[in-house]
Amino acid sequence: MRCPECRHEQQYRDGKHCGKCGYHFVFLRKKDGISDFAFRQIIHRLSEGGHYAFTDTQLALAIARPWWGKRSWIPLKPIFLLAAISFGIGLVEQFILGVLVFIMMLPWVIGLSRWRKTVFHFLSAYHLIYRYHGTHPIAGLADGQAFLHTTETELREFQYAPERILVVERDDLVDMLIRNRFHLNHKTAVIGCSGYPEYVFAACQEFLKIHPNASVQVLHDASLDGFDLTKQLMADPKWEFAHQRLTDLGISRAMLKKASSFPWLPSEELCRCYSGSSDNAFLEMILPDKSRLSGTMSADHIRMLDAGRRMPVDYVGPKQLMNLLGAAMTTGSLALVAANDIGEVIVDTDGDETDDFG
């Protein structure tokens, strides 16, 4: 184990506290598939050296990214097993029968192997984040609570002259955008559909009284709830002040029809339940469909939506998302970046330490 604080090489038998600086190790690579050192490097790369705040979705996807779109065109182990079975049948029965079994089963084996490679362990990565965060608070993690109790200094930070309003489906995305100063750089008041932060929500009501023609754009994930968000806000008395100005800026069904494979994740409720549970083995046991715990790379958006999955708008890193969003507010359409074009998080393990999560 390498200490992420002082880079001291620690042996497993020497315990979970660094013998040089006292750092408490959270992970055991053999058990968790990742080390503290690799985990911290992923955070460093995602935040670009601590310059950007990020959501737990962005971090979990960065941890799980080595699985994205990796498919084995020649699954050697299953093919060897199938060949052995076919050869056995040929010895016992007939050679021709064994060959026929091999030919008939080969496409199925290849298809099964390719399907498995489209699944990545999103909730496992998600749970790792909160295990680490519980011991070593992650400074860059945006959790939707940064502005619940706004100080006088922070209130002054919100005193700027916006040109538009951006309503965001999730409060953690609100935090990520504000902490990265998106609201200042793009002259945009950023608020959650829940009315968070309260001070900004109140200011937006006054702003639209003075500027009734200002645009109010709605950002959301690709999900059944997300597609209906604008209509829900229009029907909500709380948002009556903005009813006439609301326009959809989120991921639409039409965009998904033209898209390639993207990461589809479990529902937001399941993610929160999984991350906050101390007994995830129990959660896995009571869930009737274990596949709901995994992320899936898929271009079949209809099947993914019917299964209750969502494609998060923050499937890209914070800097890239803000660049895309800044352009979208001008053009009125959010562009999608193909999963293969997203920069992979590379972890330097100095050769002797490799990690399944990157």
Image (tube, rainbow, N blue to C red):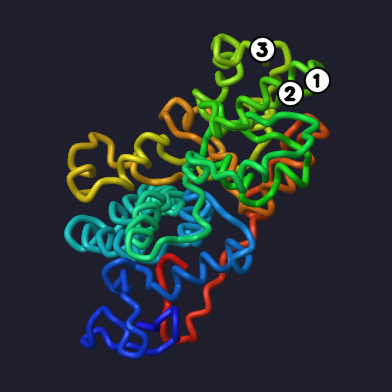
Query: Residue 241: x percent and y percent?
Result: 66, 13
Query: Residue 53: x percent and y percent?
Result: 58, 55
Residue under label 2: 207
What's the amino acid at mark 1? His
Looking at the image, which residue is at 71% across and 39% down?
A: 159
Looking at the image, which residue is at 40% across and 66% down?
A: 76
Looking at the image, which residue is at 31% across and 55% down?
A: 96
Query: Residue 100: x percent and y percent?
Result: 34, 50
Q: Do the residues labelled 2 and 1 touch (CB within 8 Å)?
A: yes
Looking at the image, which residue is at 22% across and 62% down?
A: 88
Residue under label 3: 243
Give the left or right position of residue 160, taking residue 58 as reference. right
Query: Residue 156: x percent and y percent?
Result: 67, 43
Mark 3 or 2, closer to the camera: 2
Residue under label 1: 211
What's the amino acid at mark 2? Phe
